[in-house]
Image: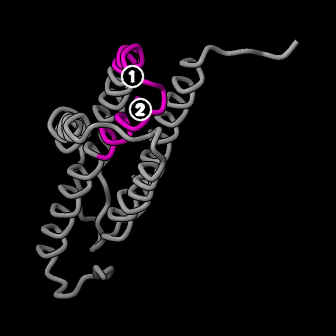
């Protein structure tokens, strides 16, 4: 007998797995120097997800999309920005490990899962996916932008005169 999961359970499990992988990657990355490129690549990679809107069943009203993006930018990005700090060690820039970051990520995951389950009752599953993609991108873009600005500021104060990883 094949295992059958309710429609909403699989996305919830995948979201939890993704969040745990982000925590693991973040903890591992704290031991290596960072660069502007490493900060910029995640939003660039995620931006390919906008291709989903080529498919009519994924489309949502513009107001919904803007609201989801702004909710991510205003409510979800702020705690991540506050807990992402850099430090210079031996002329290299490292992302400082923050215990609060892990808890914030877990709290954001829980809020996201509850919201996802709620929203799913009112719009289709594909539209729910679209909304939460925009929410996540709205969270990621300001967070990474703030990280890049902080990285560049610290890089300038190192006094090296040239950036090891220039932006294209």
Above/below status of 109 relative to 33: above
Q: Image point 26% across, 55% down: which residue?
A: 144
Residue at the disc numbered 2: 127
Q: Residue furthest front?
A: 56
Is residue 9 on the magenta stretch?
Answer: no
From the top left corner, tell me how far across and down residue 63 is, in percent: 19, 37
Q: Residues within 10 Å of mark 2 (few under 14, many from 20)?
A: many
User: Is residue 140 or residue 31 the one in the foreground?
Assistant: 140
Range covered by the magenta-colored residues: 113-137
Quadrant (top left, top right, bottom left, bottom right) of the N terminus: top right
From the top left corner, tell me how far across and down residue 45 is, in percent: 44, 60
Q: Image point 67% across, 15% down: which residue?
A: 5
**Position of 135 compared to 28: left or right?**
left
Q: Residue furthest bottom?
A: 161
Above/below status of 97 relative to 4: below
- The reply to whether discs 2 and 1 touch (Cβ–Cβ < 8 Å) is yes
Q: Image point 45% across, 25% down: which residue?
A: 124
From the top left corner, tell me how far across and down residue 73 is, in percent: 19, 41
User: Is residue 22 or residue 124 the one in the foreground?
Assistant: 124
Above/below status of 37 relative to 2: below
Q: Secondary structure at mark 1?
A: loop
Q: Which mark is residue 123?
A: 1
From the top left corner, tell me how far across and down residue 97 is, in percent: 33, 45
């Amino acid at each position: 007998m094949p295992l059958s999961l309710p429609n909403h359970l699989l996305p919830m499990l995948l979201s939890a797995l993704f969040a745990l992988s982000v925590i693991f990657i973040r903890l591992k990355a704290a031991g290596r120097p960072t660069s502007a490129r490493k900060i910029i690549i995640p939003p660039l990679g995620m931006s390919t997800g906008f291709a989903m809107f080529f498919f009519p069943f994924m489309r949502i009203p513009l107001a919904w999309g803007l609201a989801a993006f702004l909710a991510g930018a205003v409510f979800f990005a702020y705690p991540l920005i506050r807990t992402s700090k850099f430090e210079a060690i031996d002329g290299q820039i490292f992302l400082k490990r923050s215990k609060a970051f892990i808890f914030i990520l877990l709290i954001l995951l829980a809020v996201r899962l509850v919201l996802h389950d709620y929203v799913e009752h009112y719009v289709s599953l594909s539209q729910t996916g679209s909304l939460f993609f925009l929410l996540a991108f709205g969270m990621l873009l300001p967070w990474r932008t703030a990280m890049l600005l902080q990285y560049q500021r610290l890089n300038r104060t190192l006094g090296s005169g040239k950036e090891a990883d220039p932006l294209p």
